[in-house]
Image (cartoon, grey):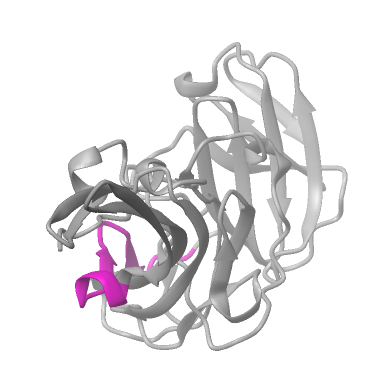
Amino acid sequence: MKKILLITSIFYSLNTFSQCTLNPVYQDSSFGIWPTVDINLPQAIQGQPYLSVIDIKTPTTLIEASGGDSALTSFDTLGQTFYVGDWVVDDFEIVSVTGLPSGISLDCYDPNCIILGNALSCATFSGTTNDPLGIYPIEIAVNVNTHGDIVYYLGPFPITVPVTTDLYSATGAYQYITGYEIEVSNISSNNIKIKTNNNILLSTIGSNKYIVINDPNFLNSSCDLRIYDISGKLIYSKEINSLPANSMFKIDNELNNGVYIFNLVSNNFQSSKKFIISR
């Protein structure tokens, strides 16, 4: 039996629910996870609360989940090869996650980290770590449940057999998702930015706080600006019709000391930044 390759969510938790908020920007998207591995996850600062919000839109069928590779969505049995790429994805089951810095866990929006096919979801990485400085690659084991019909011939007579199965039963292994990582750092300031990207920062002018954006990926495009607190609660949002260069947006909310996640989303890009406010 050929392996069915499924590239899927990175969310796993022993908890039932996380407190993240579903992002309607991705409601009509095809299968995807945001931020992507190119953007990756924010840094974790030693001894500081960590929060990263992840958005996901699950695939509808196995061919979508496999990235369009039909060679990975067929299997051999009864002397025939059966194409199963159009089988419906019932749900994803996040089986395990390894490699996270100690003290940081992943909490799913959906109960038991089982996400229905063709559904919008989210999850949060959160906690506090004092692990040594360095980059921690994350590996996630995923199972997927599906069903469909196979039709084989017994002589001239077609016989339809309904099949319900999952990735592990079909292949003997889970799919492992890699590429995401968390970097543990000891650098802490009022303006915390991911990696070396300085295109988005938090600025204080007098008693007022401003988000300053100078990211060419979003220039002159329509965007959705959101800020989440440490619990994943949405505390600020703004729709931007056309983003000019060196944009500055006053945050109307009074932000208390703590960790916040800035999320900027357009049709083609997403950027997530973490910053810490301390006085």
Which contiguous range is marked in magenta? 168-188
Residue found at x 61% / y 86%: 15
Q: Is residue 27 left or right of residue 105?
A: right
Q: How many marks?
A: 0
Q: Residue at position x 62%, y 32% from top?
A: 212
Residue 248 in which image quadrant: top right
The residue drawn where x is 71% and y is 63% is 229
Q: Nearer the viewer, residue 21 or 151?
A: 151
Vertical relation: 23 (above or below) 268 = below
Q: Nearer the viewer, residue 263 or 3?
A: 3
**Does the segment drawn in magenta span residue 270?**
no
Q: Which quadrant, please, contains the C terminus?
A: bottom right
Residue drawn at the location 21% of the way across and 70% of the way down = 171
Judge from the rendering whether residue 255 lies leftward or rightward of residue 184; answer left or right. right
- Whether residue 50 appears in this view of the structure is no
**Quadrant position of residue 76:** bottom left
Residue most toward the front?
A: 156
Relative to 268, does residue 125 appear above or below in the rendering?
Answer: below
Q: Quadrant of residue 166?
A: bottom left
Q: Nearer the viewer, residue 12 or 3?
A: 3
Q: Give the quarter of the figure containing the N terminus.
A: bottom left
The x, y position of residue 239, in whole percent, is 78, 28
Q: Position of residue 204 (x, y in %)?
A: 70, 44
Q: Is residue 221 visible?
A: yes
**Residue 20 in the image, given as x and y percentages of width and height:** 69, 64
Q: Which residue is at the front of the view, 10 or 239?
A: 10
